[in-house]
Amino acid sequence: MSLVRIDDLSIDYRRAGKTIRAVNELTFSVEEGSIVGLVGESGSGKSTLALSLMGLLPRNGSVTGGSILFEGREMQGLSEDDWRTVRGHDMGMVFQGAMNSLNPVKRVRDQVAETVRTHEPELGKDGSIDRSHELLNLVGIPSDRHEAYPHEWSGGMRQRGGIALALSGRPNFLIADEPVTALDVIVQARILRLLEDLQEALGLTILFITHDLGVVARLCDRVVVMYAAQAVEEGTVEEIFQSPKHPYTKALLGSVPNFAKGRGKSHGISGSPPSLINPPQGCRFHPRCPDAMDICTREDPYQTTFSSSQRAMCHLYDRQEADDAE
Ligand SMILES: Nc1ncnc2c1ncn2[C@@H]1O[C@H](COP(=O)(O)OP(=O)(O)OP(=O)(O)O)[C@@H](O)[C@H]1O
Ligand SMILES: [Mg+2]
């Protein structure tokens, strides 16, 4: 069953009299109990989507179309009171840069206890402190460090603290926005293992946002690839890594040493992502695409389905479905 269903979702920001479409007609689902990886270059709209799922878009941002269903319930138009219950309790978020978002002048134990108390006031002061210790143990912080201030913790510990905060309302859906990006590889591996363990122990469903495909390969069941505010490809981890269809997905894989085909050499993607104020006509990837054709400069690609789980938006496959049907 889908825990989260995002359907044709568009999100705009207004800045200096201009409109930035940060998420454009995005559709995908997150099945209960799964880990879905959302990947794409900087500025592709990943965090914007995450914030919209939590009802936390900044003032200048708004959903301009489509819907978000959580457990079958429409999230658009929820009152701020309703959001307060949903946020934290139904869904928790590890924010991008979470390790720098702990309050520097408060002991971590007390910060976690405070958020616990907003969700479970009946626990009282002592009960919420007990629960805070439980959560910090759960994310692997040794007991004798719980009462430290954030600056006394390493980056990895602070990131664990961010995860404890996200879990403080006992959510069943966790959004983790680049939770390991600023960490060294050993600490990264530990945090990933922690997320895997938590998923199993708590039955969590996770939307894992990253630009690191190596991390996705290790952790996720499915992958959604975003480019310039759109989902250009979606599939299981096996499909995306073994048989990517969209040239952008292939380029992303080519930029990771372990996945680059041929001579073990990786290469970046040339050019840079387009402006979202005035994106290119036709396929947004065409100015950087090695396979671009004439039609790509003029017409929006539509979606081709390759299996029950894999689909991509690319003109290369325009005839495929028709051919398959013959
Ligand atoms: N508050 C804002 N006001 C105006 N534009 C914004 C705002 N936040 C983000 N944007 C723009 O929206 C687009 C998507 O940004 P977003 O932060 O969602 O990307 P991202 O995929 O999370 O990138 P990164 O990998 O760097 O975290 C970018 O063009 C960004 O400049
Ligand atoms: Mg981001």
Image (cartoon, grey):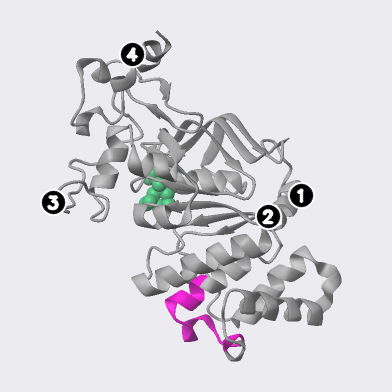
Q: Which residue is mark 1?
A: 81
First of labels 2, 4 by sequence position: 2
First of labels 3, 2 by sequence position: 2
Q: Nearer the viewer, residue 222 or 105?
A: 222
Mark 3: few/some/many CA within 10 Å (<14, 14-19, 20+): few
The alpha-carbon separation of the residues under discs 3 and 2 comes to 43 Å
Mark number for residue 319? 4
Labelled pair 1, 3 in contact (Cβ < 8 Å): no
SS for dot 4: loop
Mark 2: few/some/many CA within 10 Å (<14, 14-19, 20+): many
The alpha-carbon separation of the residues under discs 4 and 3 comes to 32 Å
The amino acid at mark 4 is Arg
First of labels 1, 3 by sequence position: 1
First of labels 4, 1 by sequence position: 1
323 shown above or below 41? above
Q: Which residue is mark 3?
A: 263
96 shown above or below 73? below
Magenta stretch, residue numbers: 145-159
First of labels 2, 1 by sequence position: 1
Q: Mark 4, mark 1: which one is toward the viewer?
A: 4
The amino acid at mark 3 is Arg
SS for dot 3: loop
The amino acid at mark 2 is Asn
Q: Seen from this angle, which residue lies furthest bottom?
A: 144
Residue for point 28% across, 45% down:
252
Labelled pair 4, 3 in contact (Cβ < 8 Å): no
